[in-house]
Image (cartoon, rainbow, N blue to C red):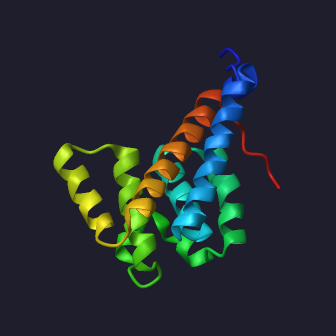
């Protein structure tokens, strides 16, 4: 029988609280940089899809819908490049950069993704998307390693 996983957010709540504070700062920075809640929730969803974090996908699906992300945008998010007409340029740039931050491809691919995003996003927006993806990746890892369960609604 497998052993019970330590819920690291509960084991070290001060560290988790600091991560939540980072997330709040990212949301504030996104608003100040002119990035919509839709963009940030798409970043959260895409990171969680790539990382396979069911808990964060369930949580951020609701947040994304509340932010105005459409069900169609959520449904085709894994193939967003194939649906250019349902994501605006800012969303597409953020998603491209999010995938690079999450997957950490080789230097050349990372540079290409950064340059594509930099054609659309200003410095504050680029920085915020990178921070948003890093924060979401951290939350994904907390939830995956702690085996946070998705509860039926």
Whether residue 64 sits left or right of residue 109 in the image: it is right
Query: Residue at the location (46% across, 57% down)?
Result: 129
Furthest toward the bottom, the residue is 85
Residue 5 picture quarter: top right
Furthest toward the right, the residue is 153
Q: Position of residue 31 (x, y in %)?
A: 60, 65
Check the picture and name the quadrant holding the N terminus: top right
Whether residue 135 sits left or right of residue 92 in the image: it is right
Query: Residue at the location (70% across, 28% down)?
Result: 9
Check the picture and name the quadrant holding the C terminus: bottom right
Q: Position of residue 90 (x, y in %)?
A: 43, 73
Question: In the displayed structure, would residue 139 be above or below residue 75?
Answer: above
Question: In the displayed structure, would residue 86 be above or below residue 111?
Answer: below
Residue 72 picture quarter: bottom right
Question: In the displayed structure, would residue 41 be above or below residue 51?
Answer: below
Please tell me which residue lies in front, 103 or 82.
Answer: 103
Q: Position of residue 62 (x, y in %)?
A: 71, 62
Tell how many labels: 0
Residue 104 picture quarter: top left
Please tell me which residue lies in front, 10 or 126.
Answer: 126
Query: Residue at the location (25% across, 50% down)?
Result: 110
Whether residue 111 sits left or right of residue 42 in the image: it is left
Please tell me which residue lies in front, 90 or 60.
Answer: 90
Please tell me which residue lies in front, 95 or 17.
Answer: 17
């Amino acid at each position: 029988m497998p052993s019970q996983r330590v819920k690291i957010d509960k084991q070290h709540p001060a560290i988790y609280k600091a991560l939540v504070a980072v997330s709040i700062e990212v949301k504030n920075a996104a608003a100040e940089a002119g990035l919509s809640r839709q963009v940030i929730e798409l970043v959260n969803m895409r990171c969680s899809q790539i990382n396979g974090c069911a808990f964060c996908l369930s949580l951020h699906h609701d947040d994304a819908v509340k932010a105005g992300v459409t069900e169609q945008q959520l449904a085709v998010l894994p193939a967003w490049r194939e649906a250019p007409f349902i994501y605006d340029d800012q969303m597409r740039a953020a998603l491209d950069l999010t995938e690079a931050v999450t997957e950490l491809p080789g230097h050349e691919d990372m540079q290409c993704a950064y340059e594509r995003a930099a054609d659309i996003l200003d410095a504050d927006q680029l920085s915020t998307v990178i921070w948003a993806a890093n924060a979401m990746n951290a939350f994904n890892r907390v939830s995956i390693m702690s085996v946070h369960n998705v509860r039926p609604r």
